[in-house]
């Protein structure tokens, strides 16, 4: 299986919206992604592909000396194949290429699969944002990774 990553393009948005709407509650809007791609100079988004088909994506904001992962999602039909790993590796590499010193993110307290992925790449739990998620008031776990060169 050929898994690759590349920068997200505006032409990917229909497929991104399919994955987003099945993965997140509430999902980001198409307009939000479009603004991230065209207006937010701090944002970088990658897509994961299997045999040329977009099957996942991830985003990060590159702010001064830190990266903030905004989202990572993989089409449920392609989970467990390593797509999320490749996307996360790509986001980490973007930070390393720019000399950033750390990466942070928030993840649902109940999302054990995502927390396990992040821990595999050296992220550690550093705090809680109480009632962070508006759909069900679930807490978010704040995770950080220090980048070592």
Image: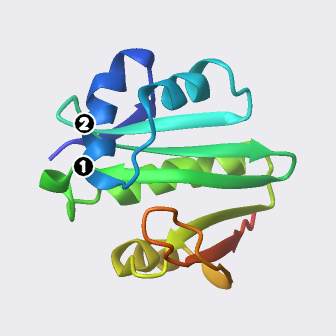
- Image coords of residue 62 (percent x, y): 74, 43
- Image coords of residue 111 (percent x, y): 39, 76
Q: Residues within 10 Å of mark 2 (few under 14, many from 20)?
A: few
Q: How far apart are marks 2 and 1 (CA)?
A: 7 Å
Q: Residue 98 carries which label?
A: none
- Image coords of residue 87 (percent x, y): 43, 50
| Image quarter (top left, top right, bottom left or bottom right) of the C terminus | bottom right
Residue depicted at 61% across the width and 18% down the height? 38
Residue depicted at 33% across the width and 43% down the height? 20
Residue depicted at 59% across the width and 69% down the height? 132
Q: Residues within 10 Å of mark 1 (few under 14, many from 20)?
A: some
Residue in the foreground of this view, choosing between 149 and 115: 115
Give the SS element for disc 2: helix
Instruction: Left or right? Give the position of 121 relative to 72.
Output: right
Q: CB atoms at circles 2 and 1 under 8 Å apart?
A: yes
Position above or below: 105 against 6: below
Residue in the foreground of this view, choosing between 60 and 26: 26
> What residue is disc 1 on?
22
Q: How many marks?
A: 2
> What residue is disc 2 on?
18
Q: Quadrant of residue 28?
A: top left
């Amino acid at each position: 299986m050929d898994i690759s990553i590349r920068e997200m393009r505006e032409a990917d948005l229909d497929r991104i919206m399919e994955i987003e709407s099945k993965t997140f509650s509430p999902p980001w809007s198409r307009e939000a992604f479009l603004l991230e791609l065209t207006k937010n100079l701090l944002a970088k988004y990658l897509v994961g592909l299997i045999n040329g088909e977009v099957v996942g994506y991830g985003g990060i904001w590159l702010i001064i000396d830190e990266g903030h992962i905004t989202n990572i999602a993989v089409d449920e039909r392609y989970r467990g194949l390593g797509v999320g790993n490749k996307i996360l590796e790509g986001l980490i590499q973007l930070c390393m290429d720019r000399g950033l010193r750390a990466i942070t993110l928030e993840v649902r307290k109940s999302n054990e699969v995502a927390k396990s992925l992040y821990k595999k790449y050296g992220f550690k739990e550093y705090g809680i944002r109480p009632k962070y998620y508006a759909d069900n008031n679930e807490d978010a776990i704040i995770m950080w990774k220090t980048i070592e060169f």
